[in-house]
Amino acid sequence: MKRRTFCSALLGGGLAAGLSGLVPAGLSHAASVPGSAASRPDLVAVHGENIAAAADAGLAAFGGMEAFVKPGQTVLIKPNMGWAVTPAGGANTSPALMKRLVEHCFKAGAKKVTCFDNPCDHWRDAYRESGIEAVVKAAGGIVAPPHSESYYQQVTIMGGKTLAAPKVHEMYMEADVILNVPVLKHHGGTGLSAAMKNLMGVVWDRRFYHGRGLDQCIADFCLYGRKPALNIVDAGRVMLSGGPRGQSYSQYKKLDLLILGRDIVATDVACALSFGAKAEEFAYIGMGAKLGVGKGSLDGMNIQRLKV
């Protein structure tokens, strides 16, 4: 997708249907009976300026962090921390969100909480300027280095079209629970960067993706057996153009939205709607659905809308 701007058709023209006009119409939810298994959401969309409070509400809808993290487990929280820019740039995951998630993990009884990313900018600069390293450490978490190939182990991707044997960071391999926490933004190569794209940051050779077909490699990796228990997408201040790092001409939209989903493909379908587009505009989403990674549509899914 080329540089785009939002206009009167923002969020697919369906704003009036959700949260008094604050959540896309595409996020319509299936009927459910409170307290039953059917009432457990597949996706949760939380609108609110306070992203920590949005995380509290979104996790509560799933039964709290305790639904994903058990006492004594180790947790990897994988943010987008790829760029040496400040949080205002919208290129990295919100530090406030990361801090709150680390706190929730420890409250649920986690033994260890780690985060890392394999950045495009120098990793020390990206970790520092993103603001994530400081808040994770302050909350008791560990920030793992990504810069040596020795930290990565070769794995097999069964059923992938292009990506067969990437090297994956040991923290991704060893964690009992993985939380995938990207920022929603424009990407010059794929059009959109969200949950599926964020997992590119756990592999060593990013150049392989770009040289052999970025969209297909993104979809292929999601076939790997170790999958995020939950995808939590920061769509607070969304970069609409000039991504993924951000440029002087980049345009932004303040959505104040947090999207949480168990199905990584469906989560990105919701992200596409929130970006003001359709999932079909982003090739990797359709490729992931075709591979059976997840649902390429929100039809029939139990989706809850919340406001904080």
Image (cartoon, rainbow, N blue to C red):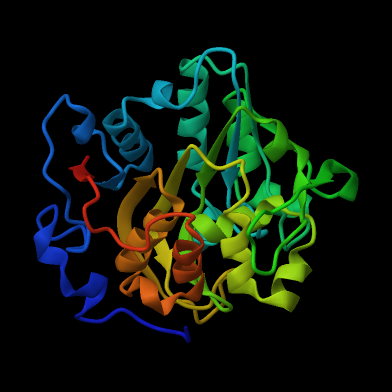
Q: Is residue 8 left or right of residue 158?
A: left
Task: Pinpoint residue 235: horizontal percent, then vertical percent.
Answer: 38, 56
The residue lying at 37 percent from left, 71 percent from top is: 279
Q: Is residue 21 left or right of residue 50?
A: left
Q: How many numbered marks have been drawn onto this rendered protein structure?
A: 0
The quarter of the picture where residue 225 lies is: top right
Nearest the eye: 24 or 152: 152
Q: Is residue 193 above or below residue 79?
A: below
The quarter of the picture where residue 132 lies is: top right
Task: Pinpoint residue 246: horizontal percent, then vertical percent.
Answer: 56, 71
Q: Is residue 141 left or right of residue 243?
A: right
Nearest the eye: 219 or 252: 219
Q: Is residue 258 left or right of residue 138?
A: left
Quadrant where the image shows the C terminus: top left
The residue lying at 45 percent from left, 75 percent from top is: 282
The residue lying at 41 percent from left, 21 percent from top is: 66
Task: Pinpoint residue 221: horizontal percent, then vertical percent.
Answer: 63, 57
